Image (cartoon, rainbow, N blue to C red):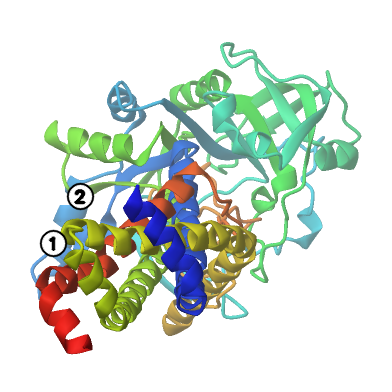
């Protein structure tokens, strides 16, 4: 008890020195509070973002990796042989992989284009040039010729089709409601009628409100669409309108000439996948095989472009599924990719940088603070050397004298930490938001600089390559099929932008308070080591003799 009473008296006697120590500790505590709350908030935001994440991924042939596997200087025959060996995965194989325990959901859709029978006209048909071929270079792929060129306005490289039949309307069959992403994200919604039955091939459909108004159609009306191939006649399909929907997505083609009205979202007709399969099966049974202008055999059968998506609950399941399918024998030329995961990882960059910055700042603060407190304590002990000599001379153990110095510093430190926590709590939210905003700006600037280095506009519109109907960079999915196929080039793109979390909950909680108390104890112990060392070294008689 004597030690604690004496420590309290010493604190009140040496007000100036203890106020100085208190101010230093308060500054350390306030800075540490800001750093800790910022770091904890950033980590919690990352964890919450991860827990709420749903990953949509596609499994497709990695054509770039396939081409890179050909030895440098290899001839075109080797490339053609390799390309013919590997094709895009079919629906049956994709469905077999979807049975994995790591897959939360799997949905898919297929699209073809059809012509009207004269009674129904596509929206924007007066804007489409009669000659839809905008070719700058060409090459053969299967039954149709592919032509490409530079998109007007500098939007990047565009690939288009030549010599294949493209209809006026895009018909898309969906496996489930989850596959209808426009309706899921709110871009489209039914305003009249009802959704068709996914489990029935009843030839019911949804049409856009624009198409309905343009042709004076209503729910219950029947529309007739035809196979667009000139080589086949009377291949007609009748659809009953089950519902009418509004679509807020843009029909702007981004300055690129609209090759077909099927590119316009207003001309999208939605059906269930079983209805779609009914169309494909009927078209296959009535198919005509003919020789096209390049001497290649081509069929009038409607096939469609498959678009599929695996859904994962978290990045760990995504990685485990990727490892599992390749362990089952899937070639490394097939890649599992996810725009959601890429965007998620990109969105975390500012948070990770902020967390690292806060951790570094905390270490610097503690290191500087510890050094300052040690120096102050060294001078403090030297000034109070006579007091140490008197106490030890009257029989007080050196360990108790050292404990008195530790107690003094601990009391001052705890009071300063409480005050510093209050200051830090007030400053942490605006400081954390400001630091996060700075990190986001840096990330955006780095991303824009990278796009510019590749000669692309920061706003998007980069190069797009045909890869099984999958979007590679910017714009809408590019899809090319054989006769009766569909092409969609920059038709109201659904490209996703990285969304950064611009606010975090940098509030002081029990965890932060506990960490600050721990920091105070550590600083007290470290800075008190000087007192302990000096006290243990001093000899009381020698100290008194020097004073005399």
Percent from the top left, x then y, of residue 417? 49, 60
- In the displayed structure, 438 sits above or below 467; it is below
Percent from the top left, x then y, of residue 75? 12, 70
Please indicate, yes or no, whether residue 466 appears anywhere in the rendered image.
Answer: no
Indicate the quadrant where residue 537 lies: bottom left
- In the displayed structure, 63 sits above or below 94; it is below
**Left or right of residue 298, residue 544 in this image:** left
Q: Secondary structure at mark 2?
A: loop
Q: Residue at x 34, y 52 (%)?
A: 2
Indicate the quadrant where residue 9 lies: bottom left
Of residues 15 and 411, the one drawn nearer to the viewer in this rendering: 15
Indicate the quadrant where residue 496 lies: bottom right
Of residues 438 and 200, the one drawn nearer to the viewer in this rendering: 438
Q: Residue at x 83, y 21 (%)?
A: 221
**Left or right of residue 358, residue 395 in this image:** left
Sequence-earlier tag: 1 or 2: 1
Q: CA distance from mark 1 to mark 2?
A: 9 Å
Percent from the top left, x then y, of residue 370? 31, 73
Is the residue marked by circle 1 packed among few (<14), some (14-19), or many (20+) residues within 10 Å?
few
Is the residue marked by circle 2 packed among few (<14), some (14-19), or many (20+) residues within 10 Å?
some
Which disc number belongs to residue 69? 1
Q: Residue at x 48, y 78 (%)?
A: 20
**Left or right of residue 105, residue 215 in this image:** right
Instruction: State the count of labels.
Output: 2
Rendered-image quadrant of the C terminus: bottom left
Asked whether the residues under the numbered discs 1 and 2 touch, taking CB atoms below 8 Å apart as contact, a structural biologist would say yes
Percent from the top left, x then y, of residue 53? 47, 40
Q: Secondary structure at mark 1?
A: loop
Which disc number belongs to residue 333? 2
Please indicate, yes or no, whether residue 83 appears anywhere in the rendered image.
Answer: yes
């Amino acid at each position: 008890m004597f030690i604690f009473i004496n420590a309290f008296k010493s604190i009140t006697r040496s007000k100036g020195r203890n106020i100085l120590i208190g101010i230093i500790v308060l500054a350390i505590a306030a800075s540490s509070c800001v750093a800790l709350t910022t770091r904890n908030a950033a980590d919690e935001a990352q964890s919450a973002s991860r827990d709420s994440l749903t990953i949509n991924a596609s499994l497709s042939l990695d054509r770039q990796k396939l081409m890179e596997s050909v030895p440098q200087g290899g001839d075109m025959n080797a490339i053609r042989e390799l390309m013919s060996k590997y094709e895009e995965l079919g629906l049956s194989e994709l469905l077999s992989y979807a049975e994995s325990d790591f897959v939360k959901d799997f949905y898919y859709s297929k699209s073809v284009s059809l012509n009207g029978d004269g009674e129904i006209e596509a929206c924007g048909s007066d804007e489409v040039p009669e000659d839809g071929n905008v070719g700058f270079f060409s090459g053969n792929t299967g039954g149709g010729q592919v032509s490409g060129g530079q998109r007007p306005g500098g939007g990047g490289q565009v690939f288009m089709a030549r010599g294949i039949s493209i209809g006026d309307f895009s018909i898309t069959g969906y496996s489930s409601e989850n596959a209808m992403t426009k309706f899921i994200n709110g871009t489209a919604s039914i305003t009249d009628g009802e959704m068709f039955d996914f489990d029935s091939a009843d030839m019911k459909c949804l049409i856009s409100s624009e198409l309905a108004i343009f042709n004076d159609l209503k729910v219950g009306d029947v529309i007739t669409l035809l196979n667009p191939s000139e080589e086949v006649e009377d291949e007609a399909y009748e659809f009953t309108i089950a519902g009418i929907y509004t679509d807020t997505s843009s029909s702007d083609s981004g300055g690129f000439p609209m090759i077909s009205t099927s590119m316009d979202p207003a001309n999208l007709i939605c059906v269930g996948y079983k209805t779609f399969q009914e169309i494909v099966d009927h078209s296959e049974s009535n198919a005509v095989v003919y020789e096209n202008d390049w001497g290649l055999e081509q069929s009038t059968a409607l096939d469609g472009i498959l678009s599929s998506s695996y859904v994962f609950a978290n990045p760990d399941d995504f990685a485990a599924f990727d490892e599992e399918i390749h362990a089952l024998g899937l070639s490394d030329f097939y890649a599992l990719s996810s725009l959601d995961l890429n965007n998620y990882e990109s969105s975390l960059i500012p948070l990770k940088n902020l967390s690292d910055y806060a951790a570094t700042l905390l270490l610097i603060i503690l290191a500087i603070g510890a050094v300052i407190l040690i120096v102050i304590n060294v001078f403090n002990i030297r000034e109070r050397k006579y007091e140490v000599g008197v106490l030890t001379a009257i029989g007080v153990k050196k360990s108790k004298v050292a404990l008195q110095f530790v107690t003094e510093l601990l009391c001052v430190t705890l009071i300063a930490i409480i005050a510093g926590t209050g200051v830090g709590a007030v400053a942490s939210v605006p400081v954390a938001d400001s630091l996060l905003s700075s990190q986001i700006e840096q990330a955006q600037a780095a991303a824009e600089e990278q796009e510019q280095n590749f000669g692309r506009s920061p706003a998007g519109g980069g190069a797009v390559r045909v890869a099984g109907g999958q979007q590679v960079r910017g714009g809408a999915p590019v899809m090319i099929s054989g006769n009766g196929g569909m092409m969609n080039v920059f038709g109201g793109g659904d490209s996703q932008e990285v969304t950064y979390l611009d606010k975090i909950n940098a509030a002081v909680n029990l965890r932060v308070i506990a960490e600050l108390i721990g920091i105070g104890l550590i600083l007290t112990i470290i800075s008190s080591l000087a007192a302990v060392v000096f006290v243990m070294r001093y000899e009381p008689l020698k100290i008194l003799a020097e004073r005399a």
